[in-house]
Structures are given as C-alpha cells and as structure tokens.
Image (spheres, rainbow, N blue to C red):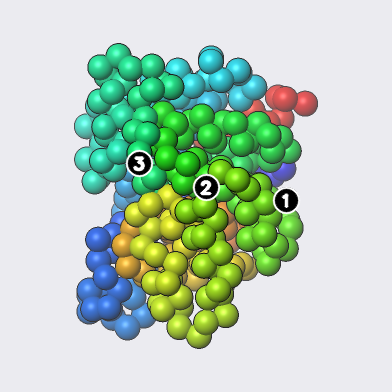
Amino acid sequence: MSVLQAQGILLGLALGDALGAPTEFMRLDPDILRTYGMAGIQEPPTPALYTDDTQMTLALLQGVLEAGIDAPPEVMMPVVAHHFLAWGISPENNRAPGTTSMRAIANLRAGYDWRTSGIASSKGCGSAMRVAPLGYLYQHQPERLREVAHLSGLITHGHPAAVAASIGAAYAVKLALDGVPPETYLARMLAFTDGISEDYDRALLRVGHVLTLGSEAHAMRHIGEGWVGEEAVALALYCVLRYPDDYVRAVQRAANSDGDSDSIACIAGGIMGARLGLTAIPESWRARCENQELLMELGRQMKEARDGRR
C-alpha cells in the first residue's frame, strides 16, 4: 500500500474538517448561501485550521502507533486514553470540542479506567470522526479493525449507535483502500455492522432512499444533520457515493450542509483520501493545511507500521 494513501487519508480528513469548520452550526439556507454565495463554501480558509475532529484523530493514531499496532487491547487502550487526556488539557483544545468527549476526558482525569470513562448513553459522532487511520492500519485484518474501532470509541462514547458508527467509518476507509466499487459500500458496511444498532442501520438505509434524488440538499436533510454518529457516517457516505472520483466535490458537498458540517466533511475526506490518494487533493489546499508536515510524517509512520508487520 502506497504512502500516498496514508497521507491522503490524513490530509483528506484534515482539509475536509477545515473546509467544514466555518459552516458548522449554520443552516445551508439561508446562512451558508447568504455568507458564501449560491455555490456555498468552496475552499478551506488560509490557513486551513482543523478542529477537534482532526485533533482527536491524531491523538488516536499516535496512541495506536506508540503502543504498537498489534498490541493487545489491555496494552493499547490505556495509551490511547493517555493521548486523549493530553489532548483534553492542551491549550490547543479550543475548537468547540464535543461535550461527550470532554465529559469522558474529565472522567479519565478523575481516575476512571478507559473501560468506564465513556458516556454510555451518548451516540454523538465524536468516536466515528476520528477512526479513519484504523481503516488503513487494519485494512487486511477486518476483525482487528472492528475490535480497535469499537474499544477506542468506548473511551468516550458507549451507545450502540456510536459503536456501529465507529466501526462503520473505519470500515469505509478499508473498502476505499480495497478498491471495491463504491456502489457496494452501503451493503458491505451494513453487513459488517449487522446486529449492533438499529439506529445506525436506519440511517444508512436512508442513504439508499435518496441517492438518486435530484436535490442533494433535500437528500441530506432526509438523512439528518450529523450530530449523532449514525447520521454523520451516513451523510459522509452519501457525499462519497455522489462524487466517488472527485475529492473536492465530495468534501464541498459535505461542508455545505445543515448541522455538523466539519465532522461530515472530515469523515468523507478521509474516505476519499483513501480511495484517491494524496494527489487527488489540490496542491494549493495541501499547502495551506495546518501542520502539513506533521500529517505527512504520520502518514509515513502509518505505512512503516504496516510494513513492519510483514
């Protein structure tokens, strides 16, 4: 697997996140259209600053790499939790972090074990938005992918819909790397998470209901707003399936949406980066991305970790 896929995932999600950040909490009509024109937001700001979505993705990735990608859960998850805790108290954590994640961080600070720190009733999208690197690291180990996505999500989110969303989001990246036809993603994702959450299943099925609808804005409103995990994954999947060969148009569609636009675009951007690689992202976008050199280096470390397993 090329390093360009690993780097494409990280730059892809970070730039999707940065593109959607200014439109989070805004309605498409009238707020976004009034602010950015009838085409909506088209490019990330300069500099392209990402949000807690990418920050937590990097914390998860660095924890997994530090522990070792083949480390058992009882070794890996405390390291991941430590990186989440460090992020939680960092001065950089000033970008509207999710309430559930911050409550879980407070539990970790109070001495809770990683198995009990998460909020059992929460199905927010905070656990799904951060798992894209797992799809790369465990592309050829689907059961390990399921385990790590599940357990790393439980550190903050415990609802079955959040569990399914975390697993589904990571699995979508695996499918993109596998090169399977995008039109099969929906059925494959539903099969992989079968029996975990009816809420998640219903959200993904709504994608199929509206995929050919003429109005993309109406289609996305039918799916939801993305504040909860199942809707964020479903909306990101919709954007990917509408524009499977165009990174820019996929994340633009995600960012020009009601609700949690940065998380939707972050998830979609990671999938598209996996599918198309780094070079599909405009060079001018990459040049303005916050911490570009760090993201490129972590992409190299992702590939080295995979190669070291052989």
Q: Gap in Å between the C-alphas at discs 2 and 3?
A: 13 Å
The residue that appears at 36% across and 80% down in the rendered structure is 39
**Numbered disc 2: secondary structure:** loop
Residue carrying label 2: 197
Residue 252: quadrant of the picture = bottom left
Residue 89: give x, y in percent of width and height. 24, 27
- Closer-to-camera residue (167/282): 167
Q: Gap in Å between the C-alphas at discs 3 and 1?
A: 31 Å
The residue that appears at 63% across and 41% down in the rendered structure is 136
Q: Which mark is residue 37?
A: none
Label 2 or label 3, whichever comes before in sequence order: 3
Q: Is residue 11 visible?
A: no
Q: Which mark is residue 178?
A: 1
**Numbered disc 3: secondary structure:** loop
The amino acid on which the numbered mark 2 sits, given as a three-letter code, is Ser
Q: Is residue 135 visible?
A: yes
- Local crowd size for mark 1, using a 10 Å CA cut-off: few (<14), some (14–19), many (≥20): some
Q: Is residue 130 above or below residue 251?
A: above
Residue 76: give x, y in percent of width and height. 53, 20
Residue carrying label 3: 122
Residue 259: quadrant of the picture = bottom left
Label 3 or label 1, whichever comes before in sequence order: 3
The amino acid on which the numbered mark 3 sits, given as a three-letter code, is Ser
Q: Is residue 23 left or right of residue 192?
A: left
Please state which of the two labelled residues, at mark 3 or mark 1, is closer to the viewer. Answer: 3
Q: Is residue 277 above or below residue 246?
A: above
